Image (cartoon, helix red, strand yellow):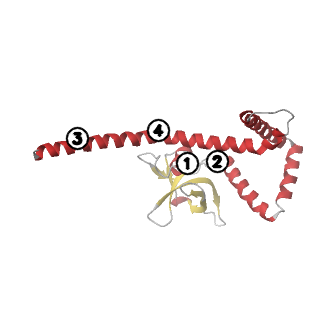
Amino acid sequence: MSDDKLESDGAEKETVARFVRSRLISGLFVLVPVWVTIVVIGAAFGAMSSLLAPLVRMAPWTLSPLAERAISVVAFVLLVFLCGAVASRMLGRRLLAWGESLILRVPLVKSIYSASKQVVDAISLTKQAAFKSVVLVEYPRPGLKAIAFVTGVSSDAAGRRWCRVFIPAAPPTSGFLELIPIEDVEATDMSVEQGLKMVVSGGFIAPDRIATHPFREET
């Protein structure tokens, strides 16, 4: 067999291997998000059903495992709805505040409850547009830029204006609150939603071009 024939066969095998590899990768990009969604939803429903399953089993009639889980999930959703309805009333808010004060007196439970409540409050504040805009700041050292979210502007005793910015970690499990001179903050053309997607994805989901301009306070 000639060298040209061997090279031709080798190139053809490499082309086939490249084709198969690219299709496998494309298939993973399609299936992985679906799989993660199914796992997360399954875990959520499992947690909801397991919480009230002992009470459902106390019913005088016999239920199949599937029916038991379904009733437990429906009961959990109704419980959440009732808690929301109670929390929206003045008396309900007072009862919740009283219950929270009791929880915060228990040493170990206090730490867990406080941390989880801070996370929930942060998420709810984000939904209420606590993040006003996306900016770039020099962090963690001069010459490097970090994505940050403006939460407001404050003044010191001398009248100097400072931006309150939250610099999230990627993925956003934590972050830093910094006060930065307003003249050192660069505004971007990104929306808050785009900025959050960029941080959550670790930079994989990001605009190809980020336009910047001097930061100006909203009036």
For image coordinates 81% across by 33% down, the residue present is: 62
For image coordinates 78% across by 42% down, the residue present is: 53
Q: Amino acid at mark 1?
A: Leu
Residue 3 in the image: x percent, y percent? 11, 47
Tell me the residue that label 4 is attached to. Answer: 30
Sequence-first disc among 1 and 2: 2
Question: Do the residues bearing badges 1 and 3 touch, measured as CB atoms within 8 Å?
Answer: no
Q: Is residue 65 left or right of residue 134?
A: right
Q: Quadrant location of residue 174?
A: bottom right
Residue 107 in the image: x percent, y percent? 80, 65
Tell me the residue that label 1 is attached to. Answer: 196
Q: Residues under labels 4 and 3: Cα distance?
A: 27 Å
Sequence-first disc among 4 and 2: 4
Q: Which mark is residue 154?
A: none
Tell me the residue that label 2 is attached to. Answer: 126
Question: Do the residues bearing badges 1 and 2 touch, measured as CB atoms within 8 Å?
Answer: yes
Camera-near label (3 vs 2) is 3
Q: Residues under labels 1 and 3: Cα distance?
A: 44 Å
The front one of 79 and 92 is: 79
Camera-near label (4 vs 1) is 4
Q: Amino acid at mark 3?
A: Glu
Tell me the residue that label 3 is attached to. Answer: 12
Q: Residues under labels 4 and 1: Cα distance?
A: 22 Å
Sequence-first disc among 1 and 3: 3
Camera-near label (4 vs 2) is 4
In the rendered image, which quarter contains the N terminus? top left
Residue 195 in the image: x percent, y percent? 53, 48
User: Could you classify mark 4 by the number of other residues whose Cα lies within 10 Å: few (under 14), some (14-19), or many (20 or more)?
Assistant: few
Q: Quadrant location of residue 108?
A: bottom right
Helix, strand or loop for disc 4: helix
Q: Residues under labels 3 and 2: Cα distance?
A: 53 Å
For image coordinates 43% across by 64% down, the residue present is: 143
